[in-house]
Image: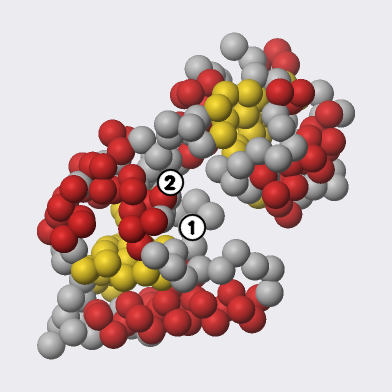
Amino acid sequence: MNKGTAYGVGVGPGDPELMTLKACRLIRENDIIAVPGKAAKESVAYRIAAAAVPEIADKDLIPIVMPMVRDRNVIEESHRKAADTIERILDEGKNVVYLTLGDSTIYCTFSYIQHILENEGYHVELVNGIPSFCAAAAALGTSLTEWDQSLHVIPALHNTESMPDWPGSYVLMKSASHMAEVKKMLENSGKDVQGVENCTMDSERIYRSLDEIPDDSGYFTLLIAKDNDAVR
């Protein structure tokens, strides 16, 4: 029996209208949908997909638990369990569509599962979604780069001590849990900083300056820092 394919499918940043046609088609065409979280229907990724593809409610939903911890042993164990769950389905010749927020190639938990699956001989395909920082730039009405500018995407959670001294624009992701530290780091950067919380969702909030960004902003908060002369 031929093994199934695992699809890592990005559902975009939040607005169901920003899901790609390919993502919607794969959800419709396949019966098994893996969703990160303890309760599949409560996850943000599921709610986004369900608004665009109502038929997903009748699919076989597989919750994939991904604990938000720093303990590498716990994290690796969760990846192993997730891969085992998916592999059992693939071995039956069935495909699995794994939903992921934003884009399937940017700080995506599915990437770790992908590595395990591919190392063990399974076929994996990634389907891009609109990245959160592109949606955030659009919400702010600003470009990320122009002419010869570089773009740097930084996991702020792991970079709170000093701002890298690279020319160009910065996207700071994973900022929320350390927002006070990130803001302090940015204060002397000489950059113009804006932010978006819950981008494209009903609860979206726009912050036009560093001072406006609350220290207790939500998990889905993203910052964009640009040179002052590059701000539009």
The crowd level at tag 1 (other Cα within 10 Å; few <14, some 14-19, many 20+) is some
Q: Is residue 168 visible?
A: no
Who is closer to the viewer here, 40 or 131?
A: 40
Q: Position of residue 144 (x, y in %)?
A: 55, 27
Mark 1 sits on what residue? 108
Amino acid of disc 2: Gly
CA–CA distance between discs 2 and 1?
8 Å
Mark 2 sits on what residue? 102
Who is closer to the viewer here, 41 or 93?
A: 41
Q: Which quarter of the picture shows residue 4?
A: bottom left
Amino acid of disc 1: Cys
Q: Position of residue 171 (x, y in %)?
A: 62, 37
Viewport quadrant of the C terminus: top right
Who is closer to the viewer here, 217 or 85?
A: 217
205 vs 193, left or right, is left
Q: From what the image shows, is residue 227 above or below residue 127?
A: above
Q: Position of residue 29 (x, y in %)?
A: 12, 58
Residue at x 48% of width, y 23% of height: 139
SS under mark 1: loop
- Which colouring convention does the figure follow? secondary structure
**Are the residues flagged by discs 2 and 1 in contact, CB closer than 8 Å?**
yes
Residue at x 13% of width, y 88% of height: 1
Q: Is residue 12 visible?
A: yes
Who is closer to the viewer here, 43 or 166?
A: 43
64 vs 177, left or right, is left
